[in-house]
Amino acid sequence: MTSITLSGVNKSFGANFPVISGVDLKIDDGEFCVFLGPSGCGKSTLLRMVAGLETAYSGEIRIGDRVVDKVEPADREVAMVFQNYALYPHMSVYDNMAFGLRQAKTPKDEIDRRVREAARILQIEPLLDRMPKALSGGQRQRVAIGRAIVRQPKVFLFDEPLSNLDAALRVHMRSEIATLHRNFPAASMIYVTHDQTEAMALADKIVLLHAGKDMLKHGSIAQVGKPLDLYHRPRNLFVAGFLGSPTMNFIEASFAGQQADGARVALKSGEEIVVPVDGSTLAAGAAVTLGVRPEHLAPVAASGAALGAQTLTRRVSAVEHFGEYSFVYLDGGTPAPLIAKVAGDGGFKAGDSASFAAPADCCHLFDADGIALSH
Ligand code: ATP
């Protein structure tokens, strides 16, 4: 049993600063769960509570069947990997990896077997006699992971483990962490990051935490689900705006009536878009926000009367080329300029008038409270 269950968990630093608010969450046996959210939303605090490094919270945390609220960190059968590696600088790689096992009075030959096995998995056998200062960032992070592996924990906890690595190494180590998960299928893993790409690539389950001015929501769960569920079916504006790069386009609009194939939405620019959701709870003229991702705006060659329904026509204000794709910035968006992501160079230039289809299935609609209307 390596599941982790959090029930009604709250934590404050000082009386008026809730850091974690009412978190209920189940992480299943062997699941790879990513805590994702903007800086300061409480991801690390929540992780450290599972590790036993933060206390004085209300609610209950279980690992398997055991309530661990009063269990010392060393007795929780969890191993944590930190962003800054936290290696002992005066010990060799071998001794760093063996340290926890020696403390636990594990027999010497068993320590040797486990250290060499972890070193083999992580391909750091040639480095066992080196000191940490003679290692690259990626090698140090491997040693830190090795130190977690040798403890054979039920739960691996990763706190932004790749943040100190350069971009290329981060991608490489990300795939190594995915391999580690496959090598230890019974262990549950919680991984903290603010990087949505890491979250999308690694997670079985993403827990996206709120942050911001709204203290009632700060440190609460905005949405839990599989990565593509959050991407395709965001529950609210916060989730819709957090996942995706560039972020989803939001267009202020008003509800113009419900019809058989969905809610009709009138844009301030005069266009009408139908979104296949149930808007029957909305009053006529109610303020809504239309959401459509840059990659879902499809260039339309036609113009004037030949334009089909579901199209937006705007002046191109700028184009950014990235080779494989381009970002086309469009004037006249409210509240922000619209961005379309098009293949290749797209043939657009600033000053052009350009039309884009917003396919109904790719459109999202949010009410005045920012809650997504359901399909
Ligand atoms: P980041 O991605 O920037 O690391 P995070 O989501 O992991 O952020 P936490 O480190 O959990 O956020 O911090 C949540 C909030 O709690 C922050 O506002 C932080 O300043 C505050 N905080 C964290 N630890 C303490 C502490 N020991 N005392 C007071 N406030 C703290």
Image: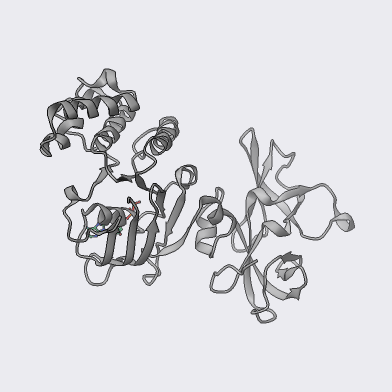
**Residue 296: image location, x then y, percent:** 67, 51
Q: Position of residue 150 (x, y in %)?
A: 24, 34
Q: Is residue 194 above or below residue 60?
A: above
| Rendered position, 197 above or below 283 | above
Q: Position of residue 87 (x, y in %)?
A: 20, 34
Residue 107 position by quadrant? top left
Q: Residue at x 26, y 44 (%)?
A: 80
Left or right: where does residue 71 sit relative to residue 44? left
Q: Residue at x 34, y 60 (%)?
A: 5
Quarter assignment of residue 319: top right
State the residue in front, 164 or 120: 120
Q: Please tell me in which quadrant of the rendered image residue 7 appears.
A: bottom left
Examine the rendered structure and indicate whether residue 119 appears above or below residue 321.
above
Quadrant including the C terminus: bottom right
Q: How is the image coloured?
A: one colour
Q: Is residue 188 left or right of residue 270?
A: left
Q: Is residue 189 left or right of residue 77?
A: right
Q: How many marks?
A: 0
Question: Could you tell whether 16 is left or right of 257 in the image?
Answer: left
Farthest residue in the bottom direction? 283
Q: Residue at x 27, y 32 (%)?
A: 146
Instruction: Point out the residue furthest to the right here.
Output: 305
Q: In the current view of this chain or complex, which residue is farthest to the top?
A: 126
Q: Decide: is 328 above or below 85.
A: below
Ligand 1, what quadrant? bottom left
Give the x, y percent position of residue 248: 59, 55
